[in-house]
Amino acid sequence: MGFQIAVCNYQVFLSFRGPDVRDSFLECFYDQLKGAGIVAFLDRKEIEYGERIDDKIVEAIKRSYICVPVFSKDFASSPACLMEVAQMVESDKTILPIFYGVEPSVVRYQLGTYEESFAKHKRKNRYPDKIEKWKAALGKIAGEMGPVLTNVNGGYLQCLKDFVFKLWKLLRMDEQDVTENLVGIDRDVPEMVRKLGFSEDGQVVKEREMTGRWLLVVWGLPGVGKTTLAKVVYNKISQLFEGCSFLENVRDEIEEKRLVFLQNRLIRDLKGGGDSSIVESPSQGTKMIRLLFKESRVLIVLDDVDDFEQIKPLAELTWFGPRSRIILTTRRKDVYQIQTSEDQVISCGHDHEILPMNENHALELFHKCAFGLDHPPKSDDQISREIISAVGNLPFAIDIVGRYLSGKNENIWRQTLDDLKSELQEKVERMLEAYYKLLGKKAREIFLDVACFFTGVEKTIPCYMWAARKLGPVIGVDELQNTSFLKIGEKNEFLMHGQLKFLGREIVKKEDEDPRQRSRVWNYEDVQATLCEKKGTSKVKALRVTRDFIQVDGEVFHHLSNLRFLELDNVDIDGNPENLLPNLVWLDWHGCHDKYKLFAFKMENLAILNLCTSSVKLNSEDWKHLMEKAGSLKVLNLKDCTWINGSMQFPASSHLECLILEGCLLFSPTIQKSISNFENLLSLNMKRCKLFKHLPQALFSMKELRELLIDRTKIQRLHFEEGSLPALEILSACECEALCEVTDSIELLKKLRKLSLRSCKNLIELPAVIGKLVLLQEMDLSDTLIKELPPSVKYLENLEVLKMVGTYLKEFPEVIKDLKNLKELDFTHCRSLRGHCNIRGLFSLRILRLKCTRISHVLARDNGQVFLHIQELGDNIVWETVP
């Protein structure tokens, strides 16, 4: 059976007969799937009591990637189980069976208990037209290879781990996200694949069919696109290996003493999920990697390495099984020329230099960045060529310069060209530093903070710190985005190119040879020099202390009087310090367990307090004391603080604006009521609060709340009262699997701008009054059971983004055809969607996604709507221009 690629509600559908299969087996199997990040449909977890199970099961099978029937002794006695396997075959699904206490031949040929069960079905004569269909389905499925569990009383853990790993590989859970512009990759990708011993279609080249282990060193200038190309190649060939891992930013991670993190990530990837923390020391990690994967055929990418010592504890060729491949991306061609010992021989190794783009590809990229078009005005063509030549046709540099020059006059273009006259390597570095100096002073401070501490961090919290320091984060971040020094990811996180991150850290290092005289300290050696010798200075503004230190003498902080940001990762403070760090704005103390040490910090200027995963137990009086002490506190993060009990209550605070309770198990009425004491709260995060089943009354009195996040809770109904949440702008209830109704009361949220109900798998419809939310800009209804949009949607005149991926739409919703501000429309994998797609009235549309639909025609305006930046259409869609 062919593996089907599709976006579905579930990745795996589990079919079993409950009385036969032990709960311990199911729980073990389900936990293994969850640990690997695989979303599974398990009927006792997913089907609500009283529903028509047949229809729900059929839909779940259709909307799953892979089906796993667990055949047991009396599986065939259940008509429902037989209907399920027949539906799997009819839907042409990829099916991987498990044989639980029964031999495959018994299932395939209907022997023993299976023969008896079919005889009973025949005597009852309830399914005369289905019995032969069921038998054929059993015969076909049982002919597939699958694990046979003869000992059903235990001993199946390793077998399940191996089976889940197989699912993980089939589902391509390790695929890398390639979001960069892919102009001109056709030159390098085929050659890199060939040097790894594969043909264009991913088959092993016969003359290279050998047992040796291969290595490819991908090298070139900074910003030339090495990481992007490695991701493309990785995605192309990863299916050919038993285990795969792509480790990014190896040099930075090791510099920050995160080698153990990399080792754990490598082990988890190669095993296909599982525990996130397996080893606790580098030596243990090395031994574990060598032991676990010595017979495995693996593909490993180590991104951005510049020294053989960085490779040694992670992935030497000889540690892995025959036909393994390792790809290194590096600036140095000779990074792997050192051998650890004479008896270690590399069977075959290659290098591949990534050269700058050719002129045509470089021009295409530059024009997109500078003009938003593939071709520039003719008058600008020559100067465009000179500029891309001056930066050596490097994609990264082209992106920076192009975005900087966008909208600038010719004099600025000429001046920029004159500034780009020097040797290539120095040119790129000097160019970046020159553009850094053109940034405003506040934007430069923000840039250095992100480069040293906040790459990959959600942007909201750092912005509170910058606001407290009067750095104008809104304007500063916007300036960095407009100049490509910073990007914002899909999860609202800061993204920064490796070359820019390197630039920012180098700028800080150049402040002084002595790290104690620098503004920011983050890597192990420099932190050690700052803390262990008790010689920190008032010049240090930001400090990260990792768990490598375990314990720090509290007296050292008296030398860091101007520290604004302090991160302590499971670090204890020794001694009995008092009045620490009077200028501290952000205290990030993961794993704090001593409230007296916490209260040793002066908190007058504290804007952010992060105690996530801590075990410090604060009662109501402690919270009152803390809030009085931290009178300027804006953000309180208690994520995964399991110590919070039902009797605890928060004191009143007029300053707190952001409260994060994500993952807090207890959410008692007392806590709910006390939240309303934060009268100026703007953001409330209650994701994964498992006991949260309805919107509490106290919530409705919060007049300033703008963001409410209740993803992955047990809430069943969204209902609001008159006058409640008048300022709410963002409502996210993603993956609330019990949510089945959004009532008409949602019209009360007059200021709502963003509504996300993604993966609410029991949500069938939107309320008819949804069109009254006239300020709504984004709406995500992906992976719900919604079949049509209410007529009132046509009144959502400010709607910019509409996502309905994997929904049950049957025809293009005419109610959206005149939404003039709609910029993004995503109907990907709406398999029932057919007919035409009328976008003539969507004047602002920039992104249109219709892949894996049955749309036959796109009706566009007579100019072809060339403004579309992204058109992801099906293979057979006809584009028609209509006046």
Image: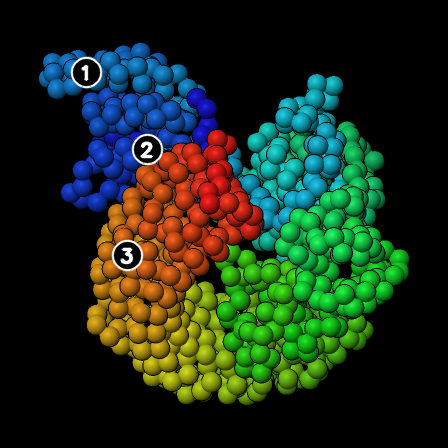
Q: Spatial distance from mark 2 to mark 1, Cα to Cα? A: 21 Å
Q: Is residue 152 above or below residue 367?
A: above
Q: Residue at x 30, y 72 (%)?
A: 725
Q: Nearer the viewer, residue 252 or 710?
A: 710
On the image, numbered disc 2 is attached to which residue? Answer: 61
On the image, numbered disc 1 is attached to which residue? Answer: 129
Task: Say the numbered circle drawn on residue 792.
Answer: 3
Q: Residue at x 52, y 52 (%)?
A: 846
The residue under label 2 is which amino acid type? Ile
Residues packed near mark 3 inside 10 Å, few (<14), some (14 to 19) or many (20 plus): some
Q: Nearer the viewer, mark 3 or mark 2?
A: 3
Q: Spatial distance from mark 3 to mark 1, Cα to Cα? A: 46 Å
The residue under label 1 is which amino acid type? Asp
Q: Nearer the viewer, residue 285 or 678?
A: 678
Q: Nearer the viewer, mark 3 or mark 1?
A: 3
Residues packed near mark 1 inside 10 Å, few (<14), some (14 to 19) or many (20 plus): few
- Whether residue 595 appears in this view of the structure is no
Q: Spatial distance from mark 3 to mark 2, Cα to Cα? A: 33 Å
Task: Please provide percent x and percent y for residue 252.
Answer: 69, 57
Quadrant the N terminus occupies: top left
Task: Judge from the rendering whether residue 461 lies leftward or rightward of residue 323; answer left or right.
Answer: left
Q: Residue at x 33, y 51 (%)?
A: 815
Q: Earlier in the sequence, mark 2 or mark 1?
A: 2
Which element carries disc 3, helix, strand or loop?
helix
Task: Please provide percent x and percent y for residue 382.
Answer: 80, 53
Q: Earlier in the sequence, mark 3 or mark 1?
A: 1
Q: Residue furthest left?
A: 124
Which element carries disc 2, helix, strand or loop?
helix
Task: Say the numbered circle drawn on residue 743.
Answer: none
Task: Judge from the rendering whether residue 670 lies leftward or rightward of residue 853; answer left or right.
Answer: left
